[in-house]
Amino acid sequence: MTVSWAPRWMCSYSPEVRTVPAGRWWNAVRVPVALGAPALTALGDATGAVIKDGFGGIMYWLVPPGDGADWRMAGVQVLGAGCHVAVPPLRRTSGPGLYWRVPLSHDRYWTDTARLGAALTSAAQFPAPL
């Protein structure tokens, strides 16, 4: 994957995972894959960038800074100011480990917080069959 665009907080040339402070450029919504996978399906093309931790079974959505701070959902944690998030290089779009499940791009950055909340609520109410 060739990367021709990167936000200021990304190091586009680094092959390493980088720890980035949340709350300045975005908040991150940390969700277990069991809840995140159906939410991602429900969001479809309306999703922004999503990071997946293939070892930890966690997904992270980027939302506008300050958004989601008042959410109270089981299994969901909103990471804002004072938190840090491990961010994979832009080129890493598959596992194992940490990668961009939905790659960050100039037109795919934040997810609309209300839509994400609705998708997560629906996924929690109607879990996928085992």
Image (tube, rainbow, N blue to C red):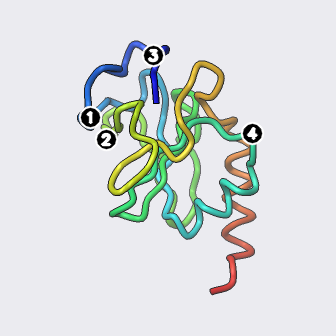
Q: CA distance from mark 1 to mark 3?
A: 15 Å
N-terminal of the pair, mark 3 or mark 2, is: 3
Picture layout, residue 69 above or below residue 120: above
Secondary element type, mark 2: strand
Identify the residue at horizontal 68%, vertical 76% (top origin).
Answer: 127
Q: What amino acid is labelled 4 in the image?
A: Ala
Q: What amino acid is labelled 1 in the image?
A: Thr
Residue at the far front: name it: 1
Instruction: Indicate the position of residue 110 as horizontal and vertical percent values.
Output: 60, 30
- 77 vs 56, left or right, is right
Q: Which residue is mark 1?
A: 19
Secondary element type, mark 3: loop
Q: What amino acid is labelled 2 in the image?
A: Ala
Picture layout, residue 10 above or below residue 122: above
Instruction: Indicate the position of residue 71 as horizontal and vertical percent values.
Output: 58, 50
Q: Are marks 1 and 4 in contact (CB under 8 Å)?
A: no
Q: Which residue is mark 3?
A: 7
N-terminal of the pair, mark 1 or mark 4, is: 1
Q: Are marks 1 and 2 in contact (CB under 8 Å)?
A: yes
Q: Are marks 1 and 3 in contact (CB under 8 Å)?
A: no
Secondary element type, mark 4: helix
Identify the image quadrant of residue 53. bottom left
Mark carried by residue 46: 4
Q: Which residue is mark 2?
A: 86
Picture layout, residue 73 above or below residue 100: below
Identify the image quadrant of residue 91. top left
